[in-house]
Image: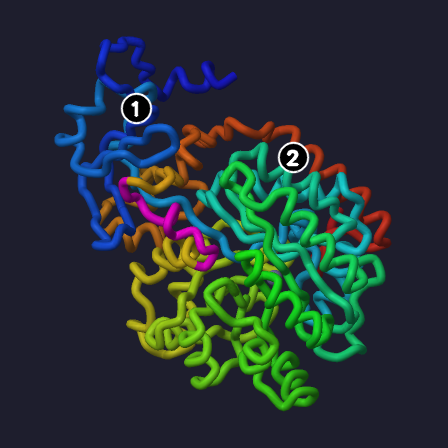
């Protein structure tokens, strides 16, 4: 299968010269946006990859001498942008089947009336179908690494990691939800019974998954995913914080997404949300807090001082009318801000290039300042800042010699990307995931000329449809299209 799809697009060099080392892949030509320490941009550049590692980055004419005839796979990227793979720092894999089914609702209604009743009815095979669908979409739109926010037992996390993540070739930090209460902000906003787990069970299962999968293939890491304040006791938050530090792993949690979150932590603990997170041990370089909208200057300072990452999800925040994250203030004050798409019913895509555009557009509106955020900052948020958030910037997030090869190419020979006056601007304001042409993860060709080589695309689409039909029936939620127009 791979042989066939390689043929039209790749020159396979059959000539091996004795004594000359061969590299695996040579990307030849095009604009290389490196995101290295000097933030070099190389016009008419090239990248050589060997055994999963980037071995050369530079001008095509210079690299040609060593690599043009001595690579197993030569890809002509002369009309493409070569950049680091995108890092999506907030993904709900099981919300793939919920796309288009929860419109016009603010967060708490959206959760209690639509999202939780569906998620609380999942069977493992349906969750797997959703995870595969989401991963397929992410690979096709240029994401090479992601942070899953929270799996629970009923989704069958082992199966998802083995069958969807490891087989697809993608990298992932997978948080498992931990909880011991059942509310959201107040105990009246109760979690669906199908999602409720005991503190001991959810904590122990995270440890089990950690020992089984953490570091596997250098592509999977197990994190703690405590639920939002209202669903976790102070003691359990502290236990999570201590254990994550001992195990040298990460923690991710939604925080200060809506005003109710502030009301809850102020009323019950007399603390602002970030102060609360800090108090229970949920700040630090191994912590990714998601949304973080309703915060003061003091809270932003605390995030910067502790090296805590904020995952910004503009589409979700706009759709659920949650508010606007103070991204430009956070960047100026030294917070590591990364980018995430959130899930199927809040975005409703997992396309991080589209998210980049929304991130770039929302800040000028919020600050009423056209210079609120630069495209370079947005590209950093989607790549190197995301890698840093996951503690993986020593290995991925930029195109530099010695790093693992997580690289995507973007076809710019298209009407909406011509003339190429400013490739950085085009990436943020004009491109979308559909423009991603090839995807390399850990030096392996995962997508070539828009064909995903590791997954059966047709089958994944069919299985997702079937799984959604069964899930909606079981949850008793009508899947009929919600519209004010007449359907005949
Ligand atoms: Zn979320």
Element under label 1? strand
Give me the residue at 52% from left, 36% from top: 217
Q: Is residue 92 above or below residue 373?
A: above
Q: Is residue 37 above or below residue 1?
A: below
Q: Position of residue 319 (x, y in %)?
A: 58, 66
Q: Which mark is residue 23?
A: 1
Kindly indicate whether the residue at mark 1 contacts the one at mark 2 (C-beta within 8 angstroms). no
Q: Choose top left, top right, bottom left or bottom right for residue 160.
A: top right
Element under label 2? helix
Q: Position of residue 349 (x, y in %)?
A: 56, 51
Q: Choose top left, top right, bottom left or bottom right for residue 70.
A: top left
* Segment tinted magenta in the rendering: 389-401
- Left or right relative to 57: residue 465: right
Label 2 to label 1, Cα distance in Å? Answer: 30 Å
Give me the residue at 39% from left, 32% from top: 52
Give me the residue at 46% from left, 43% from top: 144
Which mark sits nearer the N-terminus, 2 or 1?
1
Which is more toward the observer, 134 or 485? 134
Give me the residue at 66% from left, 55% from top: 176
Find the residue positioned furthest to the front.
Answer: 246
Residue mark closest to the camera, 2 vs 1: 1
Mark 1 is surrounded, within 10 Å at the Cα level, by few (under 14), some (14 to 19) or many (20 or more) other residues, namely many
- Left or right relative to 175: residue 62: left
Q: Position of residue 51 (x, y in %)?
A: 37, 28
Q: Which mark is residue 163?
A: 2
Q: Is residue 393 visible?
A: yes
Q: Is residue 104 visible?
A: no
- Left or right relative to 420: residue 285: right
Q: Is residue 237 located in the magenta-colored stretch of the structure?
A: no
Which is more toward the observer, 201 or 6? 201
Q: Choose top left, top right, bottom left or bottom right for residue 279.
A: bottom right
Magenta stretch, main secondary structure, is loop
């Amino acid at each position: 299968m791979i042989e066939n799809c390689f043929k039209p697009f790749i020159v396979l060099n059959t000539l091996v010269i004795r004594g000359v080392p061969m590299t695996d892949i040579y990307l030849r030509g095009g604009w290389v946006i490196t995101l290295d320490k000097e933030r070099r941009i190389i016009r008419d550049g090239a990248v050589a990859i060997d055994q999963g590692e980037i071995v050369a980055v530079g001008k095509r004419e210079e690299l040609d001498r060593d690599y043009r005839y001595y690579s197993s796979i030569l890809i002509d990227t002369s009309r493409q942008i070569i950049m680091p793979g995108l890092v999506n720092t907030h993904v709900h894999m099981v919300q793939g089947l919920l796309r288009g089914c929860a419109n016009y609702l603010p967060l708490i209604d959206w959760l209690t009336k639509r999202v939780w009743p569906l998620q609380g009815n999942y069977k493992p095979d349906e969750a797997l179908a959703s995870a595969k669908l989401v991963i397929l979409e992410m690979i096709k739109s240029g994401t090479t690494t992601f942070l899953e926010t929270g799996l629970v037992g009923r989704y069958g996390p082992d199966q998802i990691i083995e069958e969807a993540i490891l087989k697809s070739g993608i990298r992932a930090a997978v948080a498992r939800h931990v909880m011991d209460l059942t509310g959201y902000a107040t105990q009246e906003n109760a979690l669906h019974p199908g999602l409720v787990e005991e503190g001991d069970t959810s904590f122990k299962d995270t440890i089990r998954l950690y020992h089984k999968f953490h570091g596997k293939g250098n592509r999977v890491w197990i994190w703690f995913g405590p639920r939002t304040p209202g669903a976790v006791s102070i003691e359990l938050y502290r236990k999570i914080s201590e254990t994550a530090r001992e195990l040298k792993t990460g923690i991710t949690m939604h925080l200060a997404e809506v005003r109710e979150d502030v009301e809850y932590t102020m009323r019950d603990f007399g603390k602002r949300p970030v102060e609360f997170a800090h108090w229970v041990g949920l700040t630090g370089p191994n912590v990714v807090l998601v949304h973080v909208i309703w915060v003061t200057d003091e809270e932003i300072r605390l995030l910067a001082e502790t090296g805590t990452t904020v995952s910004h999800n503009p589409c979700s925040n706009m759709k659920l009318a949650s508010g606007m994250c103070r991204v430009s203030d956070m960047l100026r004050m030294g917070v590591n801000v990364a980018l995430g798409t959130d899930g199927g019913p809040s975005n409703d895509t997992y396309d991080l290039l589209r998210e980049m555009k929304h991130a770039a557009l929302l800040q000028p509106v919020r600050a009423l300042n056209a210079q609120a955020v630069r495209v370079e900052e947005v590209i950093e948020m989607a790549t190197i800042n995301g890698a840093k958030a996951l503690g993986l910037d020593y290995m991925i997030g930029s195109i530099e010699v010695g790093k693992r090869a997580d690289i995507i190419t973007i076809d710019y020979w298209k009407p909406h990307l011509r003339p190429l006056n400013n490739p950085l601007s085009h990436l943020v304001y004009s491109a979308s995931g559909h423009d991603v042409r090839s995807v390399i993860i850990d030096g392996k060709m995962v997508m070539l000329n828009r064909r995903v080589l590791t997954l059966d695309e047709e089958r994944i689409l069919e299985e997702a449809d079937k799984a959604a039909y069964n899930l909606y029936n079981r949850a008793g939620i009508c899947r009929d299209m919600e519209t004010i127009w007449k359907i005949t």
